[in-house]
């Protein structure tokens, strides 16, 4: 897989792109294409369009990322869901499942095994959200486990979006794998301390202040 294109600009706000109310949810953010699994269960047109757009984005040198965001009720059965979502994941640069999603989609039970499943399929990086235990990230050559960040949440609705936005922003900014997964965990945690989803996304200054605070100073668990 060719290396991702460098971002053309640096965003001042770390922000997930809200899903539009159309047949597919795919947005261009700087030099990155972001896809979510929710529209893939709505129709064959949505599935085919999303896959075609992701393949075109990859061919154009864009970084592509995929959050499965499982909605089992949108698919006729689990086999159809697995086949659809894994086909989309396989053409993306970065895949970001939660642990429960990873188990359902791959049949594997350990973060490292879930990551290997997608790396074998051609994904460049796999990042597995582990809830309060942080996150696990793996590429073909590196493995990282995020620091564990403890906060007092007031609204968890935007945690997954914050995590993905934090990771992608760090990825496009050229950060190391460890820095990427740490930023993702920090943004995901910080979002839960505010109400809302997109409105709760932090600025770079917010993030820097948060990472320097005592709540973000924890040992990185062993991989």
Image (spheres, rainbow, N blue to C red):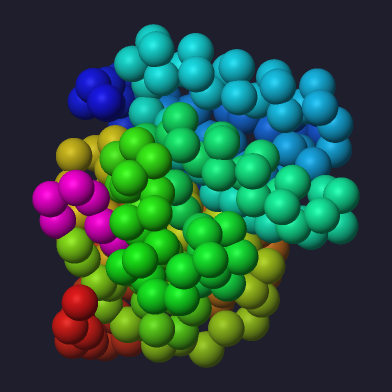
* Magenta highlight on residue 191: no
On-image quarter of the N terminus: top left
Q: In the displayed structure, would residue 222 be above or below residue 180?
A: below
Residue at horizontal 73 percent and vertical 38 percent from the top: 40
Q: Which segment did they paint magenta? A: 137-142
Q: In which quarter of the image is the C terminus?
A: bottom left
Spot occupied by residue 25 in the image (x, y as percentages of width and height): 69, 33
Please report the residue visible at 69 percent of the width from the left and 19 percent of the height from the top: 49
**Residue 163 as seen in the image, left or right of residue 208:** right
Image position of 72 (left or right of 4): right
Percent x, y for residue 114? 41, 62
Q: In which quarter of the image is residue 117?
A: bottom left
Residue 80 seen in this snapshot: yes
Residue 203 appears in view:
no
Residue at (79, 42) in percent of width and height: 41
Which residue is found at the position 74% from the left and 46% from the top? 80
Q: Which of 212 and 86 is in front in this view?
A: 86
């Amino acid at each position: 897989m060719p290396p991702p294109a460098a971002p053309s600009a640096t965003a001042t706000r770390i922000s997930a792109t809200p899903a539009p109310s159309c047949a597919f949810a795919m947005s261009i953010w700087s030099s990155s294409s972001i896809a979510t699994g929710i529209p893939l269960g709505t129709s064959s047109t949505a599935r085919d369009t999303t896959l075609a757009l992701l393949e075109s984005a990859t061919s154009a040198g864009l970084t592509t990322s995929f959050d499965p965001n499982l909605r089992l009720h949108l698919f006729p059965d689990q086999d159809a869901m697995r086949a659809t979502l894994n086909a989309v994941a396989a053409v993306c640069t970065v895949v970001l499942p939660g642990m429960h999603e990873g188990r359902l989609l791959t049949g594997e039970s350990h973060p490292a095994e879930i990551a290997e499943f997608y790396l074998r399929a051609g994904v460049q990086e796999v990042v597995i959200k582990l809830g309060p235990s942080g996150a696990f990230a793996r590429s073909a050559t590196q493995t990282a486990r995020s620091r564990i960040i403890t906060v007092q949440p007031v609204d968890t609705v935007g945690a997954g979006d914050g995590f993905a936005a934090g990771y992608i922003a760090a990825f496009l900014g050229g950060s190391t794998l460890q820095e990427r997964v740490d930023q993702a965990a920090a943004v995901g945690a910080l979002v839960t301390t505010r109400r809302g989803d997109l409105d709760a996304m932090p600025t770079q200054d917010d993030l820097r202040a948060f990472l320097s605070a005592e709540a973000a100073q924890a040992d990185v668990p062993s991989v």
